[in-house]
């Protein structure tokens, strides 16, 4: 199959970028989207042209680094999957495919399709952790937890921090990401130690990074490759307000 690619090229966050057109022949339907980009880059290198910079790691839908917007959809038009798990069989012969980076003030462009998502790391450092005593680990059944709570906490913990929620939100809000990280810890007894300061610290850091406010559009849930529920945002709001009124931590 033949495809026309319109790819965003930009040498840095302070540089002007633009879409550049490339044409590819003999694209196999069983190729993943990233394999198709590999083929393009091989051709560009042979022509002694600058290859397209894009981020990837596991290529198994686990790490979330393959962040790009494809035809207006974060990670592409197929729901519940990352870019690396999107295959060319979901496109048609002769299609024109628009590819651009995640766009948000808090995600500055490094080059082409690569953005700096270190803001997420700083939010986690602000409160996304638990305190544990050193020494022998407890047995798995030492702290009984209801199955329903464990399952809900696990669903929230499935967030891979890819940033699709930010790219999908018209306000570039990180509320779904932050709420998922707060939720899975707040529901488990191991996370109770920092419970009163976690939500405040992480929300404060989120605001300092320049993410926008949540306006309940719910596009974040629709585009999340792991199906993280916006119900976690409601839990984050409860955790935040509860900590404000019951602790001395300044919001």
Image: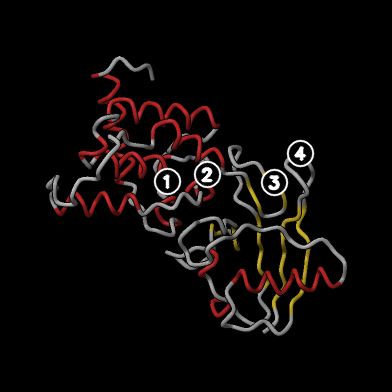
- State if disc 4 and disc 1 touch (CB < 8 Å): no
Query: Which residue is under mark 2?
Result: 170
Instruction: Measure the alpha-carbon separation of dots 2 and 4.
Output: 22 Å
- State if disc 1 and disc 3 touch (CB < 8 Å): no
Q: Kindly identify the residue that appears in the image at 72 percent across and 64 percent down.
A: 6
Rendered image: mark on residue 233:
none
Quadrant showing the N terminus: bottom right
Q: Kindly identify the residue that appears in the image at 24 percent across and 45 percent down.
A: 137
Q: Kindly identify the residue that appears in the image at 47 percent across and 64 percent down.
A: 61
Instruction: Measure the alpha-carbon separation of dots 3 and 1.
Output: 28 Å
Taking the image as shown, residue 138 lies to the left or right of residue 77, namely left
- Earlier residue among tags 3 and 1: 3
Where does the image place residue 244, in percent across and percent down from the top left? 30, 21
Rendered image: mark on residue 217:
1
* Extreme-right residue of the structure: 48
- State if disc 1 and disc 2 touch (CB < 8 Å): yes
Where does the image place residue 42, in percent across and percent down from the top left? 76, 72
* Label 4 element class: loop
Crowdedness near tag 1: few (<14), some (14–19) or many (≥20) residues, C-alpha within 10 Å: few
- Earlier residue among tags 2 and 1: 2
Where does the image place residue 192, in percent across and percent down from the top left? 24, 33
Query: Which residue is under mark 4?
Result: 14
- Earlier residue among tags 1 and 4: 4
- Earlier residue among tags 2 and 4: 4
* Label 1 element class: loop
- Earlier residue among tags 3 and 4: 4
- State if disc 2 and disc 3 touch (CB < 8 Å): no
Instruction: Measure the alpha-carbon separation of dots 1 and 4.
Output: 30 Å
Query: Which residue is under mark 3?
Result: 110
């Amino acid at each position: 199959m033949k495809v026309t690619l319109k790819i965003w090229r930009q040498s840095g966050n302070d540089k002007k970028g633009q879409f550049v057109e490339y044409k590819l022949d003999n694209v196999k339907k069983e190729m993943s989207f990233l394999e198709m980009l590999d083929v393009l880059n091989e051709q560009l290198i042979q022509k002694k042209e600058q290859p397209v910079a894009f981020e990837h790691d596991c290529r198994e839908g686990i790490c979330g680094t393959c962040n790009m917007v494809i035809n207006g959809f974060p990670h592409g038009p197929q729901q519940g999957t990352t870019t690396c798990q999107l295959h060319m069989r979901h496109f048609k012969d002769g299609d024109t495919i628009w590819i651009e980076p995640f766009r948000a003030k808090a995600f500055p462009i490094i080059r082409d399709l690569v953005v700096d998502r270190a803001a997420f790391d700083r939010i986690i450092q602000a409160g996304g952790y638990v305190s544990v005593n050193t020494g022998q680990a407890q047995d798995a059944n030492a702290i009984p937890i209801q199955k329903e709570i464990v399952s809900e906490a696990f669903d929230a913990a499935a967030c891979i921090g890819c940033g699709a929620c930010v790219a999908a939100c018209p306000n570039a809000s990180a509320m779904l990401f932050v709420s998922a990280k707060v939720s899975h810890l707040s529901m488990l007894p191991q996370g109770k130690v920092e419970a009163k300061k976690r939500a405040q610290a992480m929300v404060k850091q989120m605001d300092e990074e320049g993410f926008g406010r949540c306006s309940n559009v719910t596009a974040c849930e629709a585009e999340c490759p792991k199906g993280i529920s916006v119900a976690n945002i409601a839990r984050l709001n409860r955790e935040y307000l509860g900590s404000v009124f019951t602790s001395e931590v300044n919001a």
